[in-house]
Amino acid sequence: MKTIKQVAAAAGVSVATVSRYFNAPGQLSESTLQKVRRAVEELDYHPSALGRNLRTNRTKKILVVLPTISNPFYSQILTGMSDEAEKNGYTILACATGGDPDSEKRRLTMLYDQFVDGAVFFSTSLSKKRFDALASQYPVVQCCEYQEGSVAPAVSIDNELAAYEAVSYLLGLGHTQVAMINSDNQFESSILREKGYRRALADKGIPLREELIRRGTYGFRNGADSFGFFRSLKTPPTAVFTVADSIAVGVVRAALEQGLTVGKDLSVIGFDDTSLARVYTPGISSVAQPRRELGEETIRLLMERLSGRETAGKLVFLPHHLVIRDSTGNVCPSTV
């Protein structure tokens, strides 16, 4: 069995450098990484994870708690997390809870039992008080969804501003009857996006019609059902802002089935700029989040927490941007 001393000798570096190669590769230069990597491969060296964990009191694993793995929005974020974690000698364990509080509690035992060194939450069923207590005792970071004012650091986008800009764009196209389809959860993103919608209307002096705000799931059916409701109104909207691309697809499909020309008779904007928005015909305008970067920055923030740096209450906003496609256009005079 090869030893770490033999690897160090073969690479022409110190034993400490080989140790950093496995535990904190981000601290080494590219040339040093290559030398150690060649030695490790030539000697077919495999460090003892158990022994390393006992010496460092670290498992080199990160728990990632998310509601579902079926939502395409999460895939690029998880890729960013995985790549950044690997740079720091860590691996991620992604666990979907299905939004079930009991499932979340079971996953948290990995943190309590020190099976993982820290955790990332896309959302949580814990109250703010309980989540703050958790974050005060364990390395925890929030990604995308976050509890405002929590001691747990977070990485997200400015959801209120993103919604404000999307709705302002529709207003700039001449639409004065702009609807919103929101989620019926109490996530911070849902609250902030509705706040942005309301602010955009207020800034343009356009009266708010509460009937033009619908809430439901993030699914296709919510979009289709909401469109049907809007069409039943005496003055239906000429534009719809949705908080998810999946909802926007439901609106667009229902509109097409009614014989409307999307982008002319009705404008639609989604959120997240997932593959749904890009491949659907017509292409759906959407608010793009830097998903891979969100994942990378979340792990960097967790590494800060694990290294003992102060991160309590730190909130990092990454830039978003509006992607314009065929689903939006100037208000059609015949619909005004």
Image (cartoon, rainbow, N blue to C red):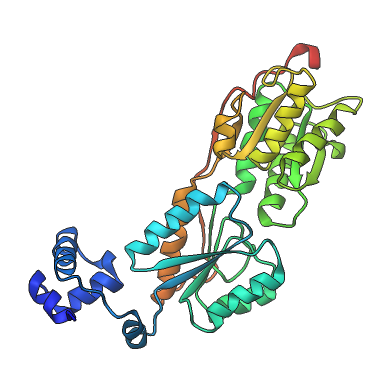
Q: Residue 218 location in percent, x, y?
A: 71, 46
Nearest the camera: 246 or 152? 246
Q: Identify the residue shown where x is 62% and y is 79%.
A: 133
Q: Is residue 184 above or below residue 18?
A: above
Nearest the camera: 209 or 244? 244
190 horizontally vs 214: left or right: left
Q: Is residue 323 visible?
A: no
Q: Residue furthest bottom?
A: 54
Q: Residue furthest top?
A: 334
Q: Quadrant of residue 327?
A: top right
Q: Identify the residue shown where x is 67% and y is 70%.
A: 103
Q: Residue 111 location in percent, x, y?
A: 53, 78
Q: Identify the residue shown where x is 64% and y is 36%.
A: 270
Q: Residue 309 location in percent, x, y?
A: 41, 74
Q: Quadrant of residue 27?
A: bottom left
Nearest the camera: 283 or 198? 283
Q: Which quarter shows the N terminus?
A: bottom left
Q: Identify the residue shown where x is 73% and y is 22%.
A: 256
Q: Is residue 255 visible?
A: yes
Q: Residue 248 location in percent, x, y?
A: 68, 35
Count of residue discs: 0
Q: Quadrant of residue 150?
A: bottom right
Q: Is residue 229 above or below residue 329?
A: below
Q: Which quarter shows the C terminus?
A: top right
